[in-house]
């Protein structure tokens, strides 16, 4: 009986050694450079975006770290960047013919978590963000926008339909100009954005900014293309001080509801909005 136990232990030891050796060589010899090149080329061929990854490092069989990730448009404008993205690929998903990937990234002073599932009968994406620093987002700086604040929220999309909610704290803008006209410096304690997406149409169910000097409410929809149409109802309620200071501008707004909000609509296109007072 003792010999049988020794034989069993020896066989199990050899089996364990084989598994460890196989996994080790698989991780060490896995063609990460080819995977990196394939990812970058797939993004470029399937979208209008460019993806650049400095390197891919293994953590385990199905866990990797993407270092120095940059997503930009075809003009070179950076849309997203992160020093490191931890990636987990579900092996059980592969067995069911489903590509299931979880991503966790440090970006803009906060954290992003993305989950995606892609298969013949399922296309799903979810995103959760927490503590993102708006002021550190390079695209706003490139556009000349001086903004600050913290952003968090969530978004889910199945097929071509999705819904999301965003919360912004301590939002501030400085030296903002719209169509060449200067806008007073604004500070908002909190802001909320809730909406639905179907294809390229974004329906705003709730867009609110609350500050001591100004309150803003927006509803409507828009087509998310440069020449996409706008159909928005905008309500603004300034403080007494701001109303006195901006009396000339507010005189253009003829409609005012019982709650003290001035009303206007935005039509035209995303690239060239046209206000109607």
Image (cartoon, rainbow, N blue to C red):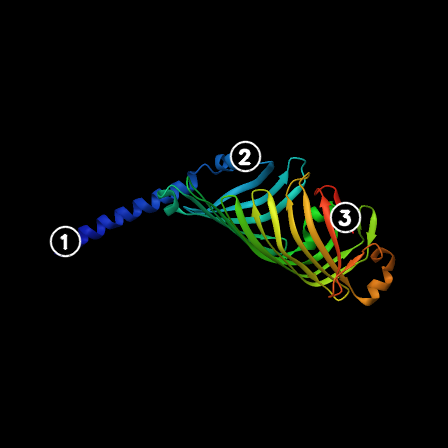
Q: Is residue 187 left or right of residue 60?
A: right
| Residue 242 against residue 179 in the figure, above or below | below
Helix or strand or loop: what does disc 2 sit on?
helix
Q: How many marks?
A: 3
- Determine which residue is flagged by label 3: 275
| Residue 190 against residue 162 in the figure, above or below | below
Disc number lying in front (1 or 3): 3
Q: x%, y% of residue 106?
A: 58, 53
Task: Please rate how many residues cluster around mark 2, counting C-alpha atoms within 10 Å: few if below 14, some from 14 to 19, many from 20.
Answer: few
Measure the alpha-carbon separation of dots 1 and 3.
90 Å
Give me the disc on residue 46. Answer: 2
| Dot 1 or dot 3, earlier in sequence | 1
Q: x%, y% of residue 74?
A: 64, 35
| Dot 2 or dot 3, earlier in sequence | 2
* Viewer-nearest residue: 28 or 81: 81
* Viewer-nearest residue: 72 or 244: 244
Task: Please rate how many residues cluster around mark 1, counting C-alpha atoms within 10 Å: few if below 14, some from 14 to 19, many from 20.
Answer: few
- Determine which residue is flagged by label 1: 3
| Dot 1 or dot 2, earlier in sequence | 1
Give me the disc on residue 152. Answer: none
Disc number lying in front (2 or 3): 3
Residue 8 in sight:
yes
Measure the alpha-carbon separation of dots 1 and 2.
61 Å
Task: Please rate how many residues cluster around mark 3, counting C-alpha atoms within 10 Å: few if below 14, some from 14 to 19, many from 20.
Answer: few
């Amino acid at each position: 009986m003792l010999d049988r136990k020794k034989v069993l232990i020896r066989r199990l030891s050899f089996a364990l050694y084989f598994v460890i050796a196989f996994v080790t060589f698989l991780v060490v010899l896995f063609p990460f450079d080819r995977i990196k090149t394939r990812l970058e080329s797939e993004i470029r061929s399937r979208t209008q975006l460019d993806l650049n990854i400095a390197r891919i490092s293994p953590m385990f069989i199905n866990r990797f770290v993407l270092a120095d990730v940059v997503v930009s448009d075809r003009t070179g404008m950076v849309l997203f960047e992160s020093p490191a993205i931890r990636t987990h690929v579900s092996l059980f998903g592969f067995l069911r013919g489903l590509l299931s990937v979880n991503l966790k990234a440090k970006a803009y002073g906060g954290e992003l978590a993305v989950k995606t599932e892609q298969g013949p009968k399922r296309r799903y994406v979810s995103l959760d963000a927490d503590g993102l620093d708006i002021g550190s987002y390079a695209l706003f700086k490139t556009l000349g926008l001086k903004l600050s604040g913290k952003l968090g929220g969530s978004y889910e999309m199945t097929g071509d339909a999705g819904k999301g909610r965003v919360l912004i704290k301590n939002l501030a803008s400085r030296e903002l100009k719209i169509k060449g006209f200067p806008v007073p410096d604004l500070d908002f304690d909190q802001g909320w954005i809730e909406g639905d997406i179907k294809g390229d149409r974004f329906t705003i169910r709730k867009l609110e900014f609350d500050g001591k000097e100004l309150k803003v409410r927006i509803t409507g929809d828009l087509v998310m293309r440069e020449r996409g149409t706008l159909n928005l109802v905008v309500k603004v309620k300034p403080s007494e001080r701001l109303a006195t200071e901006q009396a000339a501008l507010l005189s253009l707004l003829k409609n005012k509801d019982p709650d003290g909000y001035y009303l206007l609509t935005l039509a035209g296109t995303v690239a060239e909005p046209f206000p109607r007072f």
